[in-house]
Image (spheres, rainbow, N blue to C red):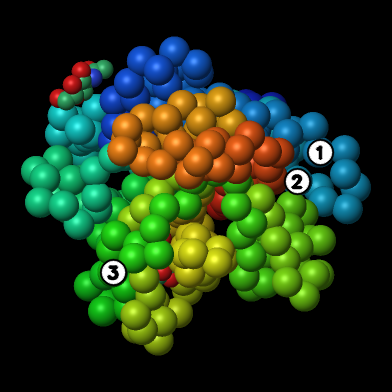
Amino acid sequence: MHSLPSSTDNLTLHLAILICEVLPPPVSCLRGPFDQIFQNFFDRGAKRLSEDNHDEQWPGIKKQIQVRTTPYNATAGQLPDAEALEGLDALVVTGSSAGAYEDIEWVKKLGRFLQDTYQQHPKVKIFGTCFGHQIINQSLFAHTGGLHVIKNPRGWELGVYEITINPKFASCFPRQLKSAARASSPQIQLQLSHQDTVVVTQSAQLPPECVEVGSTALCGMQGMYVPNRVLTLQAHPEFDREVNGACIRLIVGLDWPAEEIKEYLRMTDKDDDAALMEEVVMEFLLQGSKS
Ligand SMILES: *[C@@H]1O[C@H](CO)[C@@H](O)[C@H](O)[C@H]1NC(C)=O
Ligand SMILES: *[C@@H]1O[C@H](CO)[C@@H](O)[C@H](O)[C@H]1NC(C)=O
């Protein structure tokens, strides 16, 4: 791809982090602002994939993968221009306390930008978690009539939840999700922190290349995958238990029952499978740029 250096040993991915929430100090003091959290997430994925190169079963990546991120303050309307897009491998859309359906200027601007980029810059992949997942879905696919984003009437998902992976999605990432693909009911655990949700109203209306990632008991739509183009996750695989715990303490108001808060924090303080997702996301970002 355009941003690859000619060296055979290095492969540099250049990603724009579209920051959709300025994390307040109780969260950012733990692992930094969103762009730092994502830089670390991608670095871990790149390292894991490079280390897996010894696996003879999977020739994998023969190069050292490096990830360079550039932050954009999307909440202030700051987004990559056409020239910047030429040098980018992917857009990364973060979480937010805003709703994808809200009448907020920067949210609408971001939605239009994602739509334009998807249509006019097919080489720039789009990845997003939580709010990112919702606004990408809404911007790229709502016009098909196949889905929309709503406040989940079944309530919040806060903490580590079991996601039942769609076998079709698992088969797209066999190295990471092989055991999940074989199980009759493949499951992985990830940190969640959301109330809004994407609802597929008519899956027949969605582009045929769309693969749904999976579902939880409370939220039927845990992510969307279009090979080589788009990956979204309702979960926050970039958050660890401390960061998600700090977010949840901010989300729950003083009026929430203490027992409920305690239960959510207990749900957050659990092991998860984020490491698998680090690799899945990195494999997705490398699609088309290997060899
Ligand atoms: C990003 O924009 C928001 C909203 O305008 C502002 O509050 C915040 O300070 C900005 N952050 C940075 C790092 O410039
Ligand atoms: C958006 O949501 C729909 C419906 O839930 C899902 O099938 C699709 O894969 C999602 N697309 C993206 C890009 O997230």
- The residue identified by callout 3 is 148
Q: Earlier in the sequence, mark 3 or mark 2?
A: 2
Report, in whole angstroms, how far the alpha carbon at label 3 lies from the one at label 2: 36 Å
Say what secondary structure mark 1 lies in.
Answer: helix
**Residue 116 seen in the current view:** no
In this view, the mark in front (3 or 2): 3
Q: Name the kind of residue labelled 2 in the image.
A: Gly
Which comes sooner in the sequence, label 1 or label 3?
Answer: 1
Q: Is residue 170 left or right of residue 206?
A: right
Marks 2 and 1: in contact by CB < 8 Å? yes
Residue under numbered circle 1: 53
Please state if 229 lies on the left or on the right of 11 as rendered.
Answer: left
Query: Is 133 placed above or below 97 here?
Result: below
Q: Secondary structure at mark 2?
A: loop
Identify the image quadrant of residue 15.
top left
Q: Residue furthest right?
A: 56
Distance from mark 3 CB to nearest ligand 2 atom below 8 Å: no
Q: CA distance from mark 1 to mark 2?
A: 6 Å
Residue 97 in picture, x, y percent from top left: 28, 40
**Residue drawn 79% across the image and 32% down it:** 51
Read off the residue under disc 2.
Answer: 60
How far apart marks 1 and 3 lie (CA) works out to 40 Å
Could you tell me residue 263's position as x and y percent? Answer: 56, 42
Q: What residue lies at 52% left-to-right and 70% top-to-bottom?
A: 211
Instruction: Give coordinates of residue 88: x percent, y percent.
Output: 38, 37
- Residue 281 lies left or right of residue 90; in this view the side is right
Mark 1 or mark 2, earlier in chain? 1
